[in-house]
Amino acid sequence: MEAGGGHTAVRAIEANAFFNANTGEHSIESKTPLEPLDVTIKEPNRTLSLKGNVFSINEHFDDIRALYDIIESLYFVLPALLNIEFADPPIIERVDGIVGDSHFRWQLSKWEGHFRTTTQDQQEKAVIRSWERLNSLAEPNRRLLAAIHYFHVACRLARCGSTPGEFLPEVLLNLAKTLEVLFPPSGDGKTRDAVRIKLKELGYKEDEIEGKFIPAIALRNEIDVGHVSLCIFNPEQLKILHSFAENAEESFRELFVRVFDNVSSGMFQIVPYEVEVAGPEARKIIDRIQQFMRL
């Protein structure tokens, strides 16, 4: 619909390519952009049209359920199909329509928003504390470093999503990784029990452990997080999952404060990890990728 900002250029038209050497982000902009797309598809029972960035469907529905089904199909499936053909992955910003003489908008029925209030002084002290915590990573503490990285990725994904819960599985996966790398299992290999033991050492009560942290690991294998899953969750189940992920950020932030404070005071020790080079299987895979990339 508009020029610039993506990976798409008009063939045989002069263009400017942009590259950010700080982040690796790159885009291209044709001097003469495409006209807004104009596509009409006529089927026996409906007419579909794309005018610029507005996709419309005109169809008769026997009931609200049928209307709801087509909206869900378009919302969740059409962008994925267009992504196969387009170089820039599309998203849907808004869904609205008309039934008879009534206008409607398809929106969230419920959502939670969490905010933190602060002051100038608190933010400035937060910067100082963050700088001082570098000392806890100086040894180096490989596990703690990896844990704050995974948590940072989880928070970034939660902010980058353009649709509700777009990266929910990936957020939960990185929260699970945060706990697993921070509190590794010992001889019996039971990850959840290892996390429970260490959280108790840090002063957490059972209801806090089971409600704020263990679900991140428990869900890893069950909701298309660490493994493929084709199951469907009902709206109430999805609300619970979204709510957990939303609340988890502050829970994990508070956890890191406890960990850093206790590590710096010597009251808590993280299992050491010796930095190792990539293993033989990983090297083999990388070498194979390099081999075939030359083709």
Image: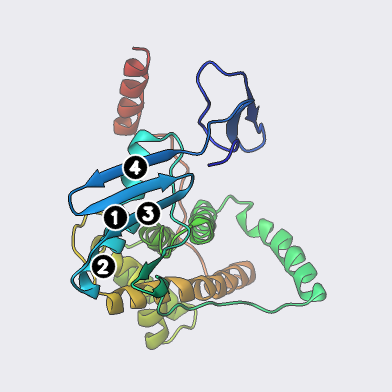
Find residue 56 and name its label: 3
Disc 1 element: loop
**Closest to the observer: 88 or 30?**
30
Between disc 3 and disc 1, whose residue precedes? 3
Residue denoted by label 2: 67
Label 4 to label 2: alpha-carbon separation: 20 Å
Label 3 to label 1: alpha-carbon separation: 36 Å
Between disc 3 and disc 2, whose residue precedes? 3
The residue depicted at 64 percent of the width and 52 percent of the height is 138
Residue 231 image position (x, y, % from top left) = 18, 63
The three-letter amino acid code for the residue at tag 4 is Thr
Residue 4 image position (x, y, % from top left) = 60, 36
Disc 2 element: helix
Label 3 to label 4: alpha-carbon separation: 9 Å
Q: Is residue 133 above or below residue 54?
A: below
**Closest to the observer: 123 or 2?**
2
> Which colour style is shown?
rainbow
The three-letter amino acid code for the residue at tag 2 is Leu
**Discs 4/2, front:** 4
Residue denoted by label 1: 226
Label 1 to label 4: alpha-carbon separation: 40 Å
**Discs 1/4, front:** 4
Residue 275 image position (x, y, % from top left) = 47, 42
Disc 3 element: strand
The three-letter amino acid code for the residue at tag 1 is Gly
Residue denoted by label 4: 40
Location of the C terminus (image quadrant)? top left
- State whether residue 9 appears in this view: yes
Q: Residues within 10 Å of mark 3 (few under 14, many from 20)?
A: some
The residue depicted at 60 percent of the width and 68 percent of the height is 260
Q: Quadrant of residue 83?
A: top left
